[in-house]
Amino acid sequence: MGGCATASPPESGPVGRFPLPWKKVLSGFASFVIKNKKMKPSEINQPLSERQQKVVDTLLGLGIDFDIKFHPPLGSIEESLAYWGKFEATHCKNLFFRNHKGNKHYLVIFECMHQMDIHDLEQRLHQGKLTFASEARMEKYLGLKPGSVSPFGLINDENHEVHLFIDKNLLNAPRLSFHPNDNTGTIIISQEDFIKFLEAMGNSYEFIELYD
């Protein structure tokens, strides 16, 4: 999947600011909420990768209901549709950008079937010239590899470096799906619980109109 001046991420929109220690202790809370959740570790029918386990522990620790589906590694939207078609959720595309100076990073999230024009996106985000962030930056800021980009990568962004631009049309979607930081699985959560997750992570985010 020139020296233009850049602006800081806008202050408007819902922004969550939970204390940083939450990210370090969430997995410790998981055992206290498991008995009250629909998804239990015993219901996960195959071993989890390290990245998947970290996402699952975080969601359990936050008291978030979710479903997890497993499939072969999916490298493109076209490959994914063969599996996603069986899941009742709005499937999202996640693009990771940097600004021209390389000192700001953005995760842009929208419905997977939409094709995003980067020049149009630059006009809408008002962050100057954008380029796709490198694999090294993706690993540094989100702890992810190409093909597995997901908002769950915020679990690894301890310093809240990444700002999220989310298409406002997703506010109309009851359920959303994302990779659990590994493209051999898909996690489905409600839109309300997705926002709850964002609030807990503490990164700035906003819902905006990404396309007409």
Image: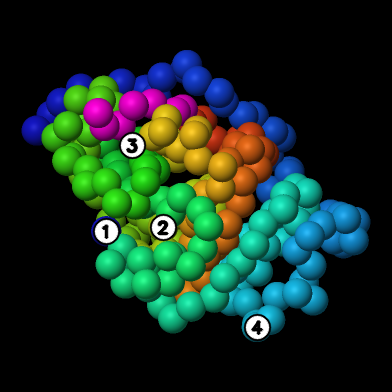
The picture places residue 64, in percent across and down from the top left corner, at 72, 49
Nearer-N-terminus badge (3/2): 3
**Counting other residues with Cα less than 10 Å from the Cα at mark 4, is it few (<14), some (14-19), or many (20 or more)?**
few
**Counting other residues with Cα less than 10 Å from the Cα at mark 2, is it few (<14), some (14-19), or many (20 or more)?**
many
Residue 103 - label: 3
Residue 188 - label: none
- The magenta stretch is 206-212
The picture places residue 129, in percent across and down from the top left corner, at 18, 33
Nearer-N-terminus badge (1/4): 1
Nearer-N-terminus badge (1/3): 1
Q: Badges 2 and 4: C-beta atoms under 8 Å apart?
A: no
The local secondary structure at tag 2 comes to loop
Marks 3 and 2, Cα distance to the nearest angstrom? 19 Å
Q: Is residue 48 above or below residue 110?
A: below
Q: Is residue 118 magenta?
A: no
| Quarter of the C terminus within the rendering | top left
Q: Which residue is mark 2?
A: 149
Marks 1 and 4, Cα distance to the nearest angstrom? 27 Å
Q: How many marks?
A: 4
Q: Which amino acid does the dot numbered 2 rest on?
A: Val
**Counting other residues with Cα less than 10 Å from the Cα at mark 1, is it few (<14), some (14-19), or many (20 or more)?**
few
Q: Is residue 197 above or below residue 38?
A: above
| Quarter of the N terminus within the rendering | bottom left
Q: Is residue 186 above or below residue 26?
A: below
Q: Badges 1 and 4: C-beta atoms under 8 Å apart?
A: no
Marks 3 and 4, Cα distance to the nearest angstrom? 39 Å
Q: Which residue is mark 1?
A: 1
Residue lying at 22% horizontally and 47% vertically, measured from the top left: 115
- Residue 123's image quarter? top left
**Mark 1 vs mark 3: in front:** 1
